[in-house]
Image (spheres, helix red, strand yellow):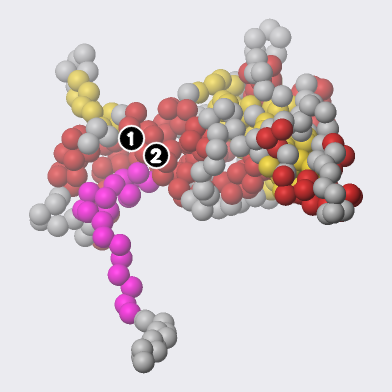
């Protein structure tokens, strides 16, 4: 007689960290440092050397210099020779992609990749995305969508099993949903307040931008993402330039940012269009017809705010939803954001830096289910 197998319980043992090569350990830290230094290789390496002194990251067998050599050999950095004889080091496109992937893993690490363009809407009809629901056959439905099992069951219920008969009224199809595509413009505030009061707000903002861009490129390649920055003015930046994004000595020209975003979205063919705006401060700047700037950093200027409400309403008329992610908790500024959001009939989130990425992703996914106009 075969002896019964004993059930095994839990086995407790000391945690063993997954094996990483010396390069991989340093590379994880380096990716964070190069993001915080906005792509400044020398500054990132200086910080890495300081961390090495304090935490003994390297060994005599593998030093920081060995790590730099590996970065070169693996194609993450390249030496630059200036016209005046000065030398330097630049990060490569491979490194830029690694930074986007790193941000994606940090913010959206629990997600799984899906099929391209896999965005559901509230429309039902002919598609290749099954909903799990059944409905009666309608003229024009794809024959491949007919559920044979459910149709035969209907025939037996309607006509009995003695004399089998199947009519058009017995046919059942599995319902489907259209797949939508989305055009998104991500607006990032680079005014000076993004680094005031000892809080680095620009690094989380650009991490979110890198993660969102990598998400769209890999999971939703049929969608489009444009990134713009706004200070005294607004201008587009390439996705590859996100690691180098820095704050400037700027005021906050929200109107210029929204107007540029609308200009970009007007040229997109996708039915679904949206603007994500990451900001921490009030609008304080406007472009005047004569080319000058009207600036007022003191309080909420009604001249500036009324123009903001007007451009938000204009975006609504174009079917463009604005979602504002306010990374401060100032009740005074929330009043402006509430009115701005009401003018657009959009959304507003008052969030800290820690959950910014998760909230943007959740809203991005949720907007996939909206009705196509």
Is residue 333 at least partly visible in the picture?
Answer: no
At horizontal 59% and vertical 33% (from top left) the residue drawn is: 117
Find residue 39 and report its horizontal and vertical position in percent: 36, 34
Q: Magenta segment range? A: 13-33
Find residue 283 and report its horizontal and vertical position in percent: 69, 31
Mark 1: few, some, or many residues within 10 Å (few <14, many ≥20)?
Answer: many
Find residue 46 and report its horizontal and vertical position in percent: 26, 44
Q: Is residue 41 above or below residue 359?
A: above
Residue tagged 1: 95
The number of discs equals 2
Residue at the right extreme of this rendering: 158
Residue tagged 2: 99
In terms of depth relative to the viewer, which is nearer, 139 or 365?
139
Asked if residue 16 lies in the magenta stretch, the reply is yes
At horizontal 71% and vertical 33% (from top left) the residue drawn is: 143
Q: Quadrant of residue 257?
A: top right
At horizontal 60% and vertical 44% (from top left) the residue drawn is: 361
Q: Quadrant of residue 232?
A: top right
Q: Is residue 195 above or below residue 94?
A: below
At horizontal 26% and vertical 56% (from top left) the residue drawn is: 20
In terms of depth relative to the viewer, which is nearer, 119 or 189?
119
Q: Secondary structure at mark 2?
A: helix
């Amino acid at each position: 007689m075969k002896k019964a197998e004993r059930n095994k319980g839990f086995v407790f043992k000391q945690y063993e960290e997954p094996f990483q090569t010396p390069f991989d350990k340093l590379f994880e830290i380096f990716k964070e440092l190069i993001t915080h230094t906005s792509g400044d290789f020398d500054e990132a390496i200086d910080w890495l050397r300081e961390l090495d002194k304090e935490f003994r990251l390297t060994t005599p067998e593998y030093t920081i210099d060995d790590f730099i050599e590996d970065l070169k050999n693996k194609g993450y950095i390249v030496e630059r020779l200036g016209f005046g004889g000065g030398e330097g080091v630049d990060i490569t496109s491979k490194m830029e992609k690694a930074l986007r992937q790193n941000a994606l893993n940090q913010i959206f690490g629990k997600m799984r990749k899906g099929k391209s363009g896999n965005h559901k809407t509230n429309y039902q009809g002919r598609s290749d995305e099954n909903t799990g629901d059944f409905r009666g056959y309608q003229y024009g439905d794809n024959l491949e969508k007919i559920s044979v099992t459910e149709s035969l069951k209907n025939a037996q219920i309607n006509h009995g099993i003695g004399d089998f008969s199947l009519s058009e009224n017995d046919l059942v199809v599995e319902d489907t949903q259209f797949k939508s595509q989305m055009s998104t413009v991500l607006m990032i505030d680079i005014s000076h307040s993004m680094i005031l009061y000892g809080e680095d707000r620009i690094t989380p903002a650009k991490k979110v931008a890198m993660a969102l861009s990598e998400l769209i490129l890999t999971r939703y390649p049929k969608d489009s993402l444009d990134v713009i920055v706004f200070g005294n003015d607004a201008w587009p930046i390439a996705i590859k330039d996100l690691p180098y994004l820095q704050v400037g000595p700027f005021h906050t020209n929200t109107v210029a940012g929204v107007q540029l975003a609308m200009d970009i979205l007007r040229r997109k063919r996708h039915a679904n269009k949206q603007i994500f705006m990451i900001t921490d401060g009030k609008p304080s700047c406007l472009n005047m017809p004569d080319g000058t700037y009207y600036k007022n950093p003191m309080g909420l200027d009604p001249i500036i705010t009324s123009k903001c409400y007007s451009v938000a309403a204009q975006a609504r008329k174009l079917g463009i939803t604005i979602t504002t992610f306010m990374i401060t908790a100032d009740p005074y500024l929330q009043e402006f954001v509430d009115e701005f959001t009401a003018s657009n009939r959009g959304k507003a989130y008052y969030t800290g830096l820690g959950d910014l990425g998760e909230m943007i992703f959740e809203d991005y996914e949720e907007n996939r289910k909206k009705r196509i106009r």
